[in-house]
Amino acid sequence: MDTPDKETKSLNFIESIIEEDINNKKHDGRIHLRFPPEPNGYLHIGHAKSICLNFGLAQEYNGKCNLRFDDTNPVKEDVEYVDSIKEDIQWLGFQWDEGPYYASDYFDKLYEWAVKLIQEGKAYVDEQSQALISEQKGVPTRPGVESPYRNRPVEESLDLFERMKNGEFEDGTKVLRAKVDMTSPNMHMRDPIMYRILHSEHHRTGNKWNIYPMYDWAHGQSDFIEGITHSLCTLEFEIHRPLYDWFLDQIVEGSYRPRQIEFARLNLSYTVMSKRKLLQLVEEGIVNGWDDPRMPTISGLRRRGYTPESIRSFADRIGVAKRDNIIDVSLLEFSVREHLNKITTRVMGVLNPVKVIITNYPEDKSEEVELTNNPEDENSGSRMVPFGREIYIDRDDFMEDPPRKFFRMGPGREVRLKGAYIIKCEDYKKDDKGNITEIYCTYDSETKSGSGATRKVKGTLHWVSAEHAIDAEVRLYDRLFVDEEPDGHKDKDFKDFLNPESLKVLSNCKLEPYLAHAKAGDKFQFQRLGYFCVDPDSRSNKLIFNRTVPLRDSWAKKNR
RNA sequence: UGUCCCAUGGUGUAAUGGUAGCACUGCAGAUUUUGGUUCUGCCGGUUCAGGUUCGAGCCCUGGUGGGACAACCA
């Protein structure tokens, strides 16, 4: 009878709309979405939300999802961005259905429709200056006034529009405007501009066009041409919807028409998301390019060591709604840790080395100890790690005068070396400045891991054999801003909140030899420290690792 | 002195007129040869005022608060 195990999954508001449409047999139950980036910049985590939403919905409802470049403004757009956008989408794990498409594919059709609107008296060529047109538009609280060209003869507009297309006029001297309503309380309905003159080479159409359509005129019609059923966009386009519908009213003939639905864009705490601000960070050299691991760009996250899976699960978790939101970055960090915990090999790396000499370990002896590659994955196997009389441990793991709850090394204290022996600190040496230079320990030969030894000590340290250690540079990344909402302060610039410690480069790190042949992009857990990946700058004679995210650290937290 | 949109724990997001749930964060504890993972528990919420109803987070009215709109950008 009842199937209590089959709970009804809760739907977000867009899924509700789609399911209702399917139930009503709207568009014969066909579901077709699209992701429409403008190729004028790199994709960021906010776009990832939109990509996961659109492509995800298509998968969920057996529909399709197009990739369509909204390339109607040649002065800002470039193939460089087209390529990076395609790469990022595929890296995230999605594939568009045919295409990719370009709004510029539809310039001819758009022109044809524009002529039709002029013929029907629904569009006209305005010859006024930009300043004048803007002035006549009025303000949201006061109606605008009509252009003196508004009711000029159709033939005149037709002729002028064709000559605009043919390149007879200078940039900015004429525009084609839709004849809607200058008194509308919605500014976008006050005779919006459909075409402007731009003698600019387009990355795909070259010099074919001297006029280019505006977003509002191109977008809905492109949706219509592609058979899009649900056209998802962010909240700031809500007020454009009446215009989206008005333009569609002028060209739609059958029963099919796309529907625009708006959702809230993603905001992340401790970061900025606007393309303009990200561009500023790049251009002013505050970060090292669009793929700097501190950037919220997809390419930055990729270089930082994020996985597509982790970004997709993040997108699932944040949900979709219509209210403004700021997602805590800790949720993003949780998502990567969750995935990396499952897939990464545990290795040992010492970031800030201090030498430990095991005085009772035979000078001529050396051995290998076995370490589990990944306790979360029983098929991951194990590997042998060299151990010796001299090892490195991390400076943070030793204190001259440690508090009782410090479960690490201190004078007279015992700790276990992960996978090896229990050692006891007998003595240590300092330099003039008081820095610890060497630590002298003895080991208990009866306590080798895996030998059935039962003696337990509270602390376990990671270590690297001094003789076998390989050198590496490690880049420690932290959030770029120290304020939760860097661009949320009226009287302050977002750059006032830059974190001076967002990047720390450690150049004297010691890693276990297993990592000698790690390749760019390879990901590991450095035991007890965090998740790290090999940076593309890395070379076989100079390894470079990026810290993706530290491990959760309840000890550090307690001592904050 | 406009139009449109939004309002549920610290942060997100469910509940579609019938027990306010989940995730992250935070705080405890158990386990642990990673102060990780895993497991358990706890803290904490319907913006306000009316109305409709047997019953309102949900419907209605008003208030308050927040956001969007005045590019020949998208």
Image: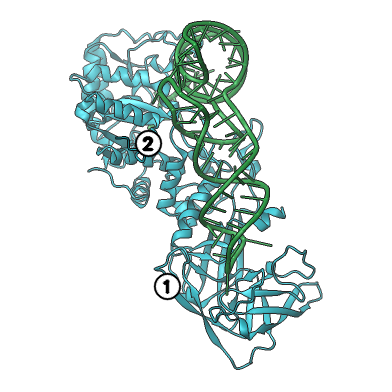
Q: Which residue is mark 2?
A: A9
Quadrant of res A54: top left
SS for callout 2: loop
Other residues around mark 1 within 10 Å, as few (<14) / some (14–19) / many (≥20): few
Instruction: Pinpoint residue A38: horizontal percent, then vertical percent.
Output: 37, 38
Q: Which chain is green?
A: B
Residue lying farthest bottom? A364
Chain to which the residue tagged by mark 2 belongs: A
Quadrant of res A170: top left
Instruction: Pinpoint residue A15: horizontal percent, then vertical percent.
Output: 35, 31
Q: Amino acid at mark 1?
A: Gly
Quadrant, the N terminus of chain A: top left
Chain to which the residue tagged by mark 1 belongs: A
Residue B43 is left or right of residue A331, and the answer is right
Q: Earlier in the sequence, mark 1 or mark 2?
A: 2
Q: Amino acid at mark 2?
A: Lys
Numbered badge on residue A176:
none
Q: Nearer the viewer, mark 1 or mark 2?
A: 2
State the residue at coordinates (42%, 42%).
A316
Cα separation between marks 1 and 2 = 38 Å
**Residue closer to the observer: B44 or A269:** B44
State the residue at coordinates (63%, 71%).
A461
Mark 1 touching mark 2, by CB under 8 A? no
**Residue closer to the observer: A462 or A55:** A462
SS for callout 1: loop
Q: Which residue is mark 1?
A: A381
Asked if A203 appears above or below B72 in the picture, the reply is below
Check chain identity for marks 1 and 2: say if they share one. Answer: yes
Residue A461 in view (yes/no): yes
Q: Which chain is cyan?
A: A
